[in-house]
Image (tube, rainbow, N blue to C red):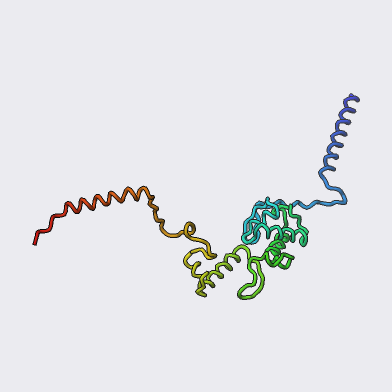
Amino acid sequence: MAEKEGKEEKKEEKKQQSAQAKGEKKSPGATGGQRKPERAPLSIVRLSGKDVNGSLNLKRAIDQVRGVGTSMSNALVFAIETKLNIPKSSNLGSLSEQQIESIEEVIKNPAHYGIPIYMLNHRKDMESGKNMHFVSNDLLFATRQDVNREISGRTWRGHRHQYGQKVRGQRTRSTGRTGTTVGVVKKAEAAKAMPAKGGEAKKEEKAAPAKPAA
């Protein structure tokens, strides 16, 4: 009996020790405190008026914005990495809201962050005279305003814009055709049609009655 009781006590001690070990693994250290839950990466991120996939890295995400091309995105990523200390390999969905706002500020005002002026898409504005860079809906509005100004000024560029024709001196013989399509008759078919028309004319002349003599 004594041996059975001793074995049961040993089993209970082992259970208690294993339970304590598991509790120490789950509970944080005394000095560390409770850890904050990590922010889950977002699947869709709103960047400068465009819904961008959050799994894309910084360069590919900036490429999705209207008004930002390949060379401009390379320059913006370099400026973001040097000025904001955000690595270009980081995914857009893992960034915080403050970081995304700072990236939008760089995209809207690239000249303030060291981007050359010749890379901006709206230099020497007609009204303000400033060098600006438009993206998203601002770019569409600015382009529409420029076209309307050309049309109202009765310029040749405005005339071409008004009638939907090419503006920069391209040829329009083979491309850029608008309106209804006109069929092209092949030479062989035209040659076959010509004698048939001549034969019909001769038949009409024979069938016509002779005029009475005066």
State the image quarter where residue 20 is shown: top right
Residue 192: x %, y % from top left? 32, 48
| Above-or-below relation of 91 to 49 | above
In the image shown, does 45 or 10 lie closer to the viewer? 45
Query: Residue placed at 22% from the left, 52% from the top?
Result: 202
In the image shown, does 88 or 45 lie closer to the viewer? 88
Residue 22: x %, y % from top left? 83, 40
In the displayed orientation, state which residue is furthest to the left: 214
Residue 208 falls left or right of residue 137: left
Image quadrant occupied by the C terminus: bottom left
Image quadrant occupied by the N terminus: top right
Query: Residue placed at 82% from the left, 46% from the top?
Result: 27
Residue 34 falls left or right of residue 3: left
Residue 113: x %, y % from top left? 74, 65
Residue 208 falls left or right of residue 192: left
Residue 68 falls left or right of residue 182: right
| Above-or-below relation of 21 to 71 | above
Total labels: the figure holds 0
Query: Residue placed at 20% from the left, 53% from the top?
Result: 204
In the image shown, does 25 or 181 lie closer to the viewer? 181
In the image shown, does 91 or 35 lie closer to the viewer? 91
Query: Residue placed at 41% from the left, 58% from the top?
Result: 180
Residue 116: x %, y % from top left? 71, 65
| Above-or-below relation of 142 to 45 | below
State the image quarter where residue 75 is shown: bottom right
